[in-house]
Image: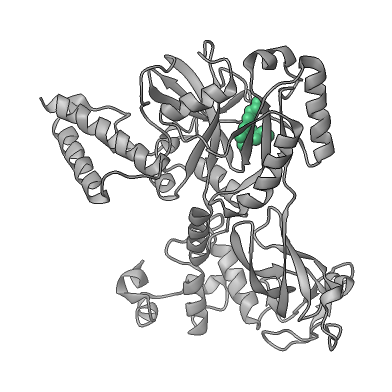
Amino acid sequence: MVRERIEELRRQLELHNFKYYVENAPEISDFEFDAMMRELQDLERAHPEYADPNSPSVRVGSDLTAEFRTVKHRYAMLSLGNTYSLDELHEFIGRIEREAGATDYVCELKFDGTAISLTYEHGRLVRAVTRGDGVEGDDVTANVRTVRTVPLRLRGTDWPDLFEIRGEILMPYASFDRLNAEREANGEQLFANPRNAAAGTLKQQSSAVVARRGLDCTLYQLAGDELPFSSHWESLEKARQWGFKVSDAARICRSVAEIDAFIEHWDTARRRLPFPTDGVVIKVNDFAVRRQLGFTAKAPKWAVAYKFKAERAATRLDSVSFQVGRTGAVTPVANLEPVLLAGTTVRRATLHNAEQMAQLDIRPGDTVYVEKGGEIIPKIIGVDLAQRPADSRPFEYITVCPECGTPLVRYEGEAKHYCPNQSGCRPQIIGRIIHFIRRKALDIEGLGEETVELLYENGLVRDVADLYDLRAEQLAPLPRLGEKSADN
Ligand code: IVH
């Protein structure tokens, strides 16, 4: 009786989890979902004999302790040939058709995350392994279990008893922005892009941390000894039925013109997607044709990636401000009219140094082009001279430190200006302390960037050594600190 109820709850929760996270079409309220989950957790606690590592209640599993185990892939995880050129893509298609005749292709988005291979036995997730070097990867099963769109148990019954499915672990922009905002507040190093953040998160030692980071998983390729399909398209449709998240952007294309149209559409439409993509993957659909074409040493001859060029946008340069780093180096920063670029709103861009600014002859009021590669801060790559206001004047670089007024210096062979006032310039002092307490150096708990600023403003620290002389009664009266954190 209890056992049946537990099974029923697990089935229901898997189903509604699927409807909510994969189909984006919940049929019950969060409240009802939570109530079922609580009932299941209570029953499981009372009846440990019915425990199951694949129960929806244990998505956040035990924390990993040691390093990750290395696992050999049953089928190697190959890479894809790639190109930025439509001409090259057309040649690639030409070669295929000379060898195999006219054939169908499946065009998919190229998801910009980190590759994962999931193994299912008897419809249950048993292993999740990173790509690693393609031959073997890290066993990150406990972490992947926390990803809501990864089914722990499959729907239906017509899956092979043993198969692997590959796809991409992605970090949606919303999760990425939230994560970096949190890290900034804690004085932690920011992730440069959602791809690095997704890969870094998968290697976390705590699956509870992974669970909070909001990862997603999209699947795009099956592997197995006896897959019951004759085409890729068929396998994608089945995977979808079994409960995997399979992108609905995929299309069958029957000609170069249809492939080109797919690319052209997504080159702009991808800007509206909630997660990052960096191209399109074109794959031969028919498995018999794939077998005929075979592989090179590294990649299949039946698939290729067409990569989008980095996104650019035009906007106005409102003003230039200057940041002084912990070493005294001065960096000019462009303040821009906010513009949407690669899924995030860009308000600032780096200008590197005086020389670069002079080379671009960049001036406030100019219309400038910004480009976002893999970096956190986008860069300005050019000026639209045709739109320059008539009264515009060349920009004059600053000669004194914007923070402390000390005349700037330029050292032999260095492109940047420096403020030489190491012992009296606020951002240099604070920057040095923050650098010292960062996670990788001292890892002082509860001491972030804001607290260091607070201590500095109140005359309590001028250098790292001062941190060790702090007493609780000096800290307690400070705003936002209170007795407990002062003691800590
Ligand atoms: S198929 C043998 N499809 O791109 C081909 N890969 O450069 C297996 N990727 O490691 C890959 N989106 O991480 C395929 N729709 C897609 C993809 C995709 C992203 C990644 C994947 C792979 C890399 C190859």
Image coords of residue 412 (percent x, y)? 89, 70
Q: Quadrant of the N terminus?
A: top left
Name which quarter of the figure residue 126 lies in.
top left
Examine the rendering and report whether any part of residue 487 can be seen.
Answer: yes
Residue found at the far top of this picture: 226
**Image quadrant, ligand 1:** top right
Residue at the spot 62% in from the left edge and 81% down from the top edge: 426
Image position of 19 (left or right of 340): left
Image coords of residue 454 (percent x, y)? 48, 79
Above or below, 477 relative to 213: below
Residue at the spot 76% in from the left edge and 81% down from the top edge: 365
As rendered, which of 32 and 463 lies closer to the eye? 32
Q: Quadrant of the C terminus?
A: bottom left
As rendered, which of 480 and 156 lies closer to the eye? 156
Residue at the spot 30% in from the left edge and 39% down from the top edge: 16
Image coords of residue 72 (percent x, y)? 56, 21
Examine the rendering and report whether any part of residue 62 can be seen.
Answer: no
Image coords of residue 209 (percent x, y)? 42, 48
Q: How many marks?
A: 0
Image position of 348 (left or right of 392): left
Image position of 433 (left or right of 488): right
Above or below, 83 relative to 133: below
Q: How is the image coloured?
A: one colour
Residue found at the far left of this picture: 1
Name which quarter of the figure residue 38 lies in.
top left
